[in-house]
Image: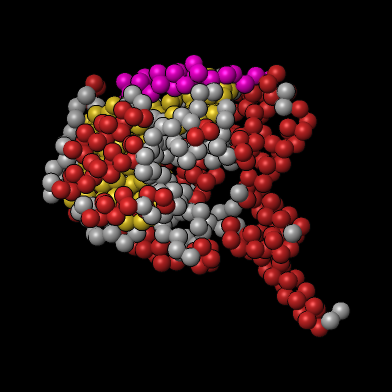
Amino acid sequence: MRPFESIGTSVLAIAEATVFIRAILRPHREPASRIAWAVVIVALPVVGVLAYLLLGEVRISLRRRLRGREIEARLPRPSGDGTLAEKIGAGFYRAPFALGRSINRLAPTSGNKVSLAADSNAAIDEMVADMDAATSTVHLCAYIWLADNNGCKIKDALVRAAGRGVAVRALADALGSRRLIRSRHWRELAVGGVQVRVALPVGNPLWTFIRGRVDLRNHRKLLIVDNRVAWCGSQNFADPEFRIKPRYAPWVDVMSRWEGAVARHCQYLFVSDWIGDGGDDISGLLAETPAKHAGSGGGAIAQVIGTGPTVSFDSMPSCFAELMHSAREELVVTTPYFVPNDQVLFALTSAARRGVKVVLALPKRNDSIVVAGTSRSYYQDLVAAGVTLFEYRRGLLHAKTIVVDRKIGLIGSANLDRRSFELNFENNILFADEGFASVLRARQDEYLADSDPVTQAVVDGFGIFGRLWQNSLAMMSPIL
């Protein structure tokens, strides 16, 4: 062996051993993830080492991480009522709210008024109406913002508000909204007086990979108007035809409109993101006193939950699992991307086994072939446990909803997948209100009416080659 070859072999062996040990010792990692990465590193020495260095750890840039910690420490928390959790169902559903509060230190709020938009286009029109009525502030956080009909409606409304002297701020994810950011529409926003910022800028991809991860994204979908109205749900600022992926259209989304104290808690998430990405300090908005909106039964109880790589590692899956464990009669879940960890999977199957009616609706056609295959690898376990499983056939079911016992639930941006669990910044609202739970549950029934049941016969029909494909993808899910 030549000297240079010997040196190269030794360097590679040292690098492989070092990365292997790091993968095994890295904290906040499930055993399945450690095993998967160990196999990849050993089986593919060069590729495996590079893959782990680029994708193996949830890394955000040091500057952004330190900035996030500093913001988290000093931002004031809007007021709430920490005793509300004890009163929800006479304390029966206390645990999900108690856990949710531990993530952002945001207590539940009461006296909120909530409604559900009829569909995606109606949601955009109602958001535009709220922006046209704004008198002080309009704040928007977008993951995907397209320069289509609905995207331009939002843009024009922001410019109109800024033209009236309203303080307008728009934060768009660098990757998800890259087409709009590179277009004339982004420049028109700035020229029109809108303060614009790019969330988690990518820049040079190699440098981004070195200092963090390019696929760590701000997946939040938020609009807060005058610190009193907030929109929260699954919808991007785009047409339901979603012309960048028309094959899977329409995108079927759900958006909720909130008035009351919870809007200021949504504002907390925007403020932390805005300052974290270099915006001006607007933390004074969090100290304003919100107006209460007494509805049926005193209004909805609502609690904001914001997760991401700057908060505790298992925040989102723990919230999902705790909410599922609280179900006593019925649990209905819709999500477009289903790649659960063991915690969430077992919460679903154990609920079904203890006699809860568990219903899970997923899209029949998914825009990710990897996610589609991985999702179906869990069908056998779900069906065997007694989960009633459906696949939505009239487009991509993109709504992320959970309703428990027609009393409490969750709506927001987070999927039941590992990206939402570990990588993305997400926003959700956990609520307790039988009126809104019934409305959201009725919307879920509409989805189920346009879905096909997944029975044992359907699962058997996948065949041995189908199961090999699905299970192979599932084996890799801890490292994806």
- Position of 379 with respect to 296 (left or right) is right
Q: Residue furthest bottom?
A: 3
- Could one spot residue 306 in this view of the protein? no
Q: Residue furthest right?
A: 1
Examine the rendered structure and indicate whether residue 132 appears above or below residue 387: below
Q: Nearer the viewer, residue 44 or 348?
A: 44
Q: Residue furthest top?
A: 449
Residue placed at 48% from the left, 31% from the top?
249
Residue placed at 78% from the left, 74% from the top?
9
Q: Nearer the viewer, residue 129 or 15?
A: 129
- Could one spot residue 128 in this view of the protein? yes
Examine the rendered structure and indicate whether residue 94 appears above or below residue 315: above
Residue placed at 35% from the left, 20% from the top?
439
- Dividing the picture into quarters, in which one does residue 375 lie? top right
Q: Nearer the viewer, residue 409 or 447?
A: 447
**What are the residue bounds of the magenta stretch?**
433-456
Q: Look at the magenta stretch and give its main secondary structure.
A: helix
Residue 436 among magenta residues? yes
- Position of 435 with respect to 2 (left or right) is left
Residue 163 among magenta residues? no
Quadrant for the N terminus, please.
Answer: bottom right
